[in-house]
Image (tube, rainbow, N blue to C red):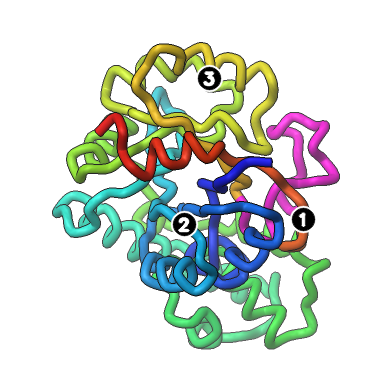
């Protein structure tokens, strides 16, 4: 059993559960600490801090960011950085705005082509509780709430959303991995490669440009990846991270764990009660929390 789960998503990005629900389940499972790592947003931080105190659990604040390296879209877990830093603030502003534009464009396309039941964009906004990070999950939630669609319809909906066309100006453009790493480090934070399935070859290059953490325990990596990460991290002053990547309904693919991540069904629905145990040890958590490497 790991002490801390350092990779979680909530309703503030593509998760199905509130911070309160995440803490409730994590405490039930025996975790002692959590991190919130919503996608390219920190709007859930205040709620997360409040619920950590309510449940008497330790925590660290974070985010999952994207960065391009060699034409690949890498994911990074970022912790304990200054959100008032100018570059960070601009990064967050861009992603909040483009996610809204992108999701609405796809929504309009689905409605126009009668691929989903008729609801309005204002319905979606009203149902998402003022969330500034918009994606397919917020639309689907509203469809389930307001129409005869059910959770069982998610596969058909998800594939239609993913295929919906958008104009060039409505597409999400990610910065380079180097710029994202430098941005988080310059804002006083910690940043590490997330779920490095078959991309451990990039670890040395990322480390040289400032990456100071790495995820080694995650449902979507295997023993080969773990071995490569641990070998890379040996004798380096680098923070070890890990977690369930839990979003509630869309996490962890428990019935497909024997498959390679690339072959897993991206539409597989998973309840919050799924028993997953990924994370980091107590020592690893407090190494990060106390910033022993700076």
Foreground residue among 211 and 160 = 211
Few, some or many C-alpha atoms within 10 Å of disc 1 (few <14, some 14-19, many ≥20)? some
Front label number (3 vs 2): 2
Q: Could you tell me how far apart the alpha carbons at marks 3 and 2 are, in whole angstroms?
A: 26 Å
What residue do we see at 43% from left, 80% from top? 130
Q: In the image, what residue occupies the spot 69% across and 33% down? A: 262
Specify whether 256 is left or right of 6: right
As drawn, is 146 to the left or to the right of 12? Answer: right
Residue 7 location (% of width, % of height): 53, 47
Place of residue 193 in the rendered image (x, y in percent of width and height, measured from the top left): 45, 32
Task: Mark 1 or mark 3: name the one nearer the start of the chain.
Answer: 3
| SS for callout 3 | helix
Q: Report the predominant secondary structure element of the magenta stretch.
A: loop
Give the magenta range: 246-269
Which of the marked residues, 3 or 2, is nearer the chain's N terminus?
2
Few, some or many C-alpha atoms within 10 Å of disc 3 (few <14, some 14-19, many ≥20)? many
SS of the residue under disc 1: loop
Sequence-wise, which precedes: disc 2 or disc 1?
Answer: 2
From the image, tell me which residue sits under label 2. Answer: 58
The span from disc 2 to disc 1 (Cα, nearest Å) is: 22 Å
| Residue pointed to by mark 3 | 229
Residue denoted by label 1: 274
Locate residue 211, reporting x and y percent: 33, 28
Left or right: 130 in relation to 207: right
Q: Quadrant of residue 98?
A: bottom left
Residue 55 visible in rendering: yes
Residue at 58%, 65% in the rendered image: 23
Q: Is residue 100 visible?
A: no
- Badge 2: residue crowd in 10 Å (few <14, some 14–19, many ≥20): some
Look at the image and say whether residue 263 sits in the magenta stretch: yes
Q: Quadrant of residue 242?
A: top right
**Which image quadrant: the N terminus?**
top right
């Amino acid at each position: 059993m790991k002490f801390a789960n350092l990779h979680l998503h909530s309703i503030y990005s593509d998760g199905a559960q509130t911070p309160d629900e995440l803490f409730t389940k994590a405490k039930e499972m025996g975790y002692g600490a959590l991190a919130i790592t919503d996608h390219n947003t920190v709007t859930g931080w205040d709620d997360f801090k409040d619920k950590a105190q309510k449940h008497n659990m330790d925590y660290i604040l974070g985010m999952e960011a994207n960065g391009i390296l060699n034409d690949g879209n890498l994911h990074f877990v970022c912790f304990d950085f200054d959100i008032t830093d100018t570059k960070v603030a601009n990064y967050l502003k861009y992603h909040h705005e483009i996610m809204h534009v992108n999701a609405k464009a796809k929504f309009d396309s689905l409605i126009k082509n009668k691929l989903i039941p008729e609801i309005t964009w204002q319905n979606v906004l009203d149902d998402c509780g003022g969330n500034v990070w918009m994606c397919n999950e917020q639309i689907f939630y509203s469809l389930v709430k307001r129409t005869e669609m059910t959770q069982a319809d998610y596969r058909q909906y998800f594939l239609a959303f993913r295929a919906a066309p958008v104009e060039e100006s409505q597409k999400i453009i990610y910065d380079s991995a180097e710029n994202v790493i430098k941005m988080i480090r310059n804002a006083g934070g910690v940043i590490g490669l997330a779920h490095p399935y078959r991309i451990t070859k990039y670890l040395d290059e990322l480390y040289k440009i400032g990456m100071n953490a790495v995820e080694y325990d995650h449902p979507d990596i295997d023993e080969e990846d773990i071995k490569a990460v641990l070998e890379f991290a040996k004798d380096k002053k680098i923070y070890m991270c890990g977690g369930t990547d839990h979003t509630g309904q869309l996490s962890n693919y428990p019935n497909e764990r024997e498959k390679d991540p690339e072959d897993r069904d991206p539409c597989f629905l998973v309840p919050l009660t799924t028993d997953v145990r990924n994370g980091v040890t107590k020592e690893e958590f407090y190494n990060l929390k106390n910033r022993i490497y700076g």
